[in-house]
Image (spheres, rainbow, N blue to C red):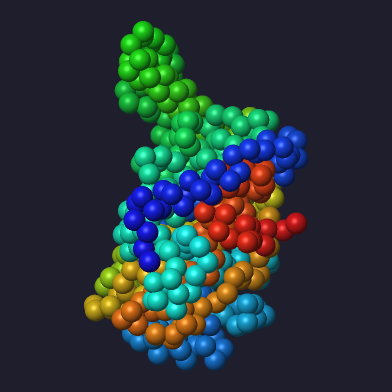
Amino acid sequence: MSLNRRQWLARCAAGGLATGLGAWSLRGNAAPGDYRSLVVIYLDGGNDGSDCLVPTDGAYADYARCRQNLALPKESLLALPAPTIGHSFGLHPALGPLRGLYEQGRLGFIANVGPLVEPCTAASILAGQSDVPPLLGSHSDQTAIVQGWGVSEDQSGWAGRGLELLPARLRHGLSALTWSTHRTLVQGRRSPVSYFDPEGSSWWGLGDLLRPQEAGMQMLARMAQWQSANAYEAEYARTFSTGFSDATAVAKAMAQAQTPSQDFGSNDRIATGLRRLASVLPVFKAQGLKRQVFQLHWGGFDTHANQRGSGSTTQDAQLDLLAKALAAFDAANRASGMDQEVVTLVMTEFGRTLRPGSGGGSEHGWGNHWWLFGGPVAGGQAVGTFPSLVLGGPDDSDGGKNGRLVPSLSSDQVGATLMEWLGLESAALLDVFPLLANFPTKTLPLLRA
């Protein structure tokens, strides 16, 4: 059954209280003096993962039958070496730049993942025997939930909460960054989120942060020193001062950055932003920062119509831009010596239904396939259980048999794995991911030992 808001809060609170004590007893996983960065690329709208990772063995017949006009021709798929999780697979043809990363063991897939309250099956859901997240199918709500929102007044996300609970030696300013107004993932309970401009502008309102002698900057600097006995005004002044300080630090770091030589494929925001990020990560490391999480929202993958084709809003065209930028980002990190210090997760709020909708598109689904790449990733494989691609089959939770797949892995298990890599103590996992109390396995084999 779908949980309402009150029930969701109760389940989250029960898990969180279970480990409130002893959270400081274990050491983190990180070695002294190191740097690690998690880059989360969020594909807005619900990317159709069923057309990104496609079985090429006997299961292709089920795929072609249920996907109908959305099915990619078998001969167009880019074959991946060696079977994994019981199948041979091919990639969407637009993902060609990423096939080499998979073959090199640098990129892996997380099969059939999504937000879960507890382990469940399509049968248990259709029988009303399992609790499921509230508001399934809602873009805004599922975006927030999969990023860690507990459907409560607490607006924090799993990365933000995790960063706040890292060992003291790994905590610092400029740890949680976003390139837009989207920030749930990196929002902590008590710490600020910093803004990262993908265009590299050094302007902050009326002042150029790199020219402190100019009148606009001097005015901003004076405002950043305001104080007040009034609680509301004091909080405004504190927030303004923190924002000004963070923006200045980011601008100065970007001014020291060296532009990568790799071809990012276009001048689209995903290309320019990842080029900018690749250039500044070595600077952040050289400055002595320890842990950072970057939240990057991009794209328009709510493909209710015209999912196939060459138009700029089709999945095909967007995947082409994305794959080129991701491959260049990985190459730039290797060239700058950041190879073992950056992990990139590509995620989205939900998958799409197996059955096409009208107009050559697909409807809102649930389980989906995410991607993970970088030097620390145990790539060249998929992790999890690949779902049955049969309408009304054992993984279809839709009463109308439209192919709304039940996730077999929880998005919290993915987040917990990545936060442990950043140094979160295992005893603190349930404080960050309270619903993991319902899962016997808390983390996944996504990263190299």
In this rendering, the answer to whether 432 lies above or below 411 is: above
Residue ID at (40%, 76%): 127
Front residue of 348 and 136? 136
Specify the quadrant that holds the N terminus.
bottom left
Q: Position of residue 145 (x, y in %)?
A: 41, 53
Query: Farthest left residue?
Result: 359
Q: Position of residue 264 (x, y in %)?
A: 50, 55
Lateral position of residue 104 relative to residue 116, left or right = right
Residue ID at (57%, 67%): 109
Residue ID at (50%, 62%): 118
In this rendering, the answer to whether 413 lies above or below 222 is: below
Q: Is residue 231 visible?
A: yes
Front residue of 339 and 368? 368
Residue ID at (41%, 53%): 8
Q: How many marks?
A: 0
Lateral position of residue 403 relative to residue 419, left or right = left
Specify the quadrant that holds the C terminus.
bottom right
Front residue of 225 and 353? 353
Lateral position of residue 307 relative to residue 282, left or right = left
Q: Position of residue 313 (x, y in %)?
A: 31, 65
Q: Position of residue 182 (x, y in %)?
A: 38, 45
Q: Is residue 423 visible?
A: no
